[in-house]
Image (spheres, helix red, strand yellow):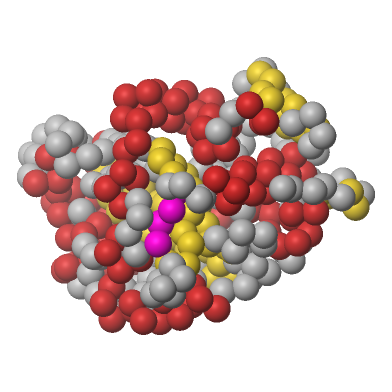
Amino acid sequence: MLIYLFYSKDYILLQLSGVPPPKPLSHFDIDKAKPRPYRPFRWEYHQTMALKKMEPDWWIELESTYRERLAQRKALYAEHGKKVLNYLPGSESACTELMHMVIQFICARYPNQFQFDPFSGRFVNKILDVEVNTKEIAPLVFLLEHVPEDFLLTAEDEKTGLYHMRAGIACSAVGWNVDEKIGKPMHEIHRVVPDYDKMKLSIDRFFSKMPADKPIQRGSWGLEVGQPLFCQPDDPHFALRNTQSASLRVEDIHLRVDWQTLRRLPQSKYIVFNFKALFTPITRFREEPYIPRLVAKVIREGKRSILDYKGTDHVEHKALPALDEWAREQEEKGWVPKDWKERTLNEDPFFPGWEATV
């Protein structure tokens, strides 16, 4: 049972987590909001967890694709059911806890867009112009319909000490789905990830010791034709990964970043991932200092098994010549020194001057 105590405008779950509540965006305009330009490119590139301390203000980031994404999520759930959303018996209280933490966060961060009465359960979404009684809706369904983030909830198995996935929403899954992963331990879920066996023990230890007040964030990336949000192996779009099309246009290639956070829920002790797919035309790289040259370096010299897992091969024949051209332009403009040695940028996961783009 969740008991609410009030300290100013903050509810007890956010305080219990030990993470500061977010600063309110009093003048937020959803139609003008741009996502931060995540560019999590590293060199030298090795498969690691690449963890960073989570920024409390950015646990859940809303931007101008909000209405489009939520409509897409509802349609995907209607079509795919448990492949998109599912939970196992015993996870209900954790799902409820997560729902309330999310509500508390978005009401604090976006006070003009959302309102919530914890006693009646009435939630008001002014962006969608709807009201919901949270006591009458499944928590994960509520999250799917109001927050453009995916969530995977994991819990420790009492016998093995390993963390198993117990519930989840994944509307942005490419090549996998919730129904096939639910109930499995982390090492089985990540079986297809290159070099995961080398990280398995450290990840298991990290999960077992992770406190609620030290959430983390990380990003994964890939290059896609178009903007495939939920794409399964039997989808015709998935087959595009198997060929290099001569007619592919550079304008159709997108960077896909899955920006992820990981935190422990303070009451149930579940560990929850949340992640959101962000798509950016790679033509934007032309105006982003260092990015074209860094990405070209990773594609050409990065470990092939990792790049194959990311699925970059089907666009490299068009992307690399464009990246090289943009890199030369940036050198000629003086944005990037010609003798610059490719490395992870100091602004990681962004790039110099990124603040002016949002």
Q: Position of residue 132 (x, y in %)?
A: 67, 23
Q: Is residue 69 above or below residue 281?
A: above
Q: Position of residue 201 (x, y in %)?
A: 36, 81
Is 14 placed left or right of 200 in the picture? right
Q: Position of residue 347 (x, y in %)?
A: 54, 67
Q: Position of residue 313 (x, y in %)?
A: 15, 54
From the viewer's side, name the closer residue of 40 and 73.
73
Q: Would residue 167 be counted in the magenta stretch?
A: yes
Is 162 placed left or right of 127 in the picture? left
Q: Is residue 18 visible?
A: yes
Q: Would residue 125 be counted in the magenta stretch?
A: no
Task: Work out which residue is located at the far right of the displayed protein and give it.
Answer: 8
Is 97 placed left or right of 37 in the picture? right
Kindly identify the residue that appears in the image at 30 percent across and 68 percent down.
Answer: 187
Quadrant occupied by the C terminus: top right
Residues shaded magenta: 164-168
Kindly identify the residue that appears in the image at 63 percent across and 53 percent down.
Answer: 58
Q: Main secondary structure of the magenta part?
A: strand
The image quarter in which residue 308 lies: bottom left
Q: Is residue 327 visible?
A: no
Is 6 placed left or right of 105 in the picture? right
Kindly identify the residue that appears in the image at 60 percent across and 48 percent down.
Answer: 93
